Image (cartoon, helix red, strand yellow):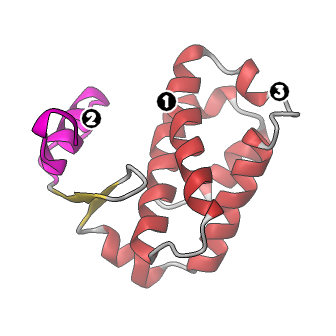
Amino acid sequence: MPDGLQPETAAAGHQALRGHDVSRECLRINRFGFAEYDDMAGIVRETDLPAMAETLRQIVELVLAEDESGLVEAMTMEAQADFAVPLGMAAEMLRGDRNSDMELVAAACTVRYSAERHMDEFPRGLATLLRRLPR
């Protein structure tokens, strides 16, 4: 963490900027930069993780695969910052094959959360895929 920030402090600051409930305590910031929370353990237990990973891969391919679709350029600057950046982080994570279940869930939840306020500007197919991800 830069400047000696603890993961909890960094996550709380990030969530405060997003207007999210900062009373949730972050367990840690994982190696991909996603915050992990204790309630994500329930998602790990209750979710079809291979299907969730596949949905996340489909979103990455649709939006970022050489950006042939032009989706990123069509987004507002705010949507690019809110959504495309975490999606790029998730893409980097998906390139590896040694991701923990918690890392996958943290990435999927972050991508979904970051897309929420911009869903109306996304094509229907992308919005449908995003709604398959956990909150």
Task: Determine whether the residue tagged by mark 2 lies in a helix, strand or loop.
Answer: helix
To which residue does mark 1 refer?
82
Would residue 74 be visible to someone looking at this image? Answer: yes
Residue 12, labelled with which disc? none
Visible residue check, residue 135: no
Residue under pointer 3: 70
Is residue 16 within the magenta segment? yes
Label 3: few (<14), some or many (≥20) within 10 Å? few
Mark 3 secondary-structure assignment: loop
Q: Which residues are magenta?
A: 1-24
The amino acid marked with disc number 1 is Asp
Q: Quadrant of residue 96?
A: bottom right
- Pointer 3 and pointer 1: residues touching (CB < 8 Å)? no
The amino acid marked with disc number 2 is His
Q: Which residue lies at the image location 34% right of the left edge and 77% below the top edge?
A: 42
> Which of the two labelled residues, at mark 2 and mark 1, occupies the earlier sequence position?
2
Compared with 29, 105 (above or below) is below
- Quarter of image, res 14: top left
Q: Does 8 sit left or right of 42 as displayed?
A: left
Q: Where does label 2 land, which residue? A: 14
- Is 6 situated above or below 104? above
Q: What separation in Å lies between label 3 and label 1 (alpha carbons)?
A: 17 Å
Left or right, 107 with reference to 102: right
Helix, strand or loop at disc 1?
A: helix
Choose the circle earlier in sequence order: 3 or 1.
Answer: 3
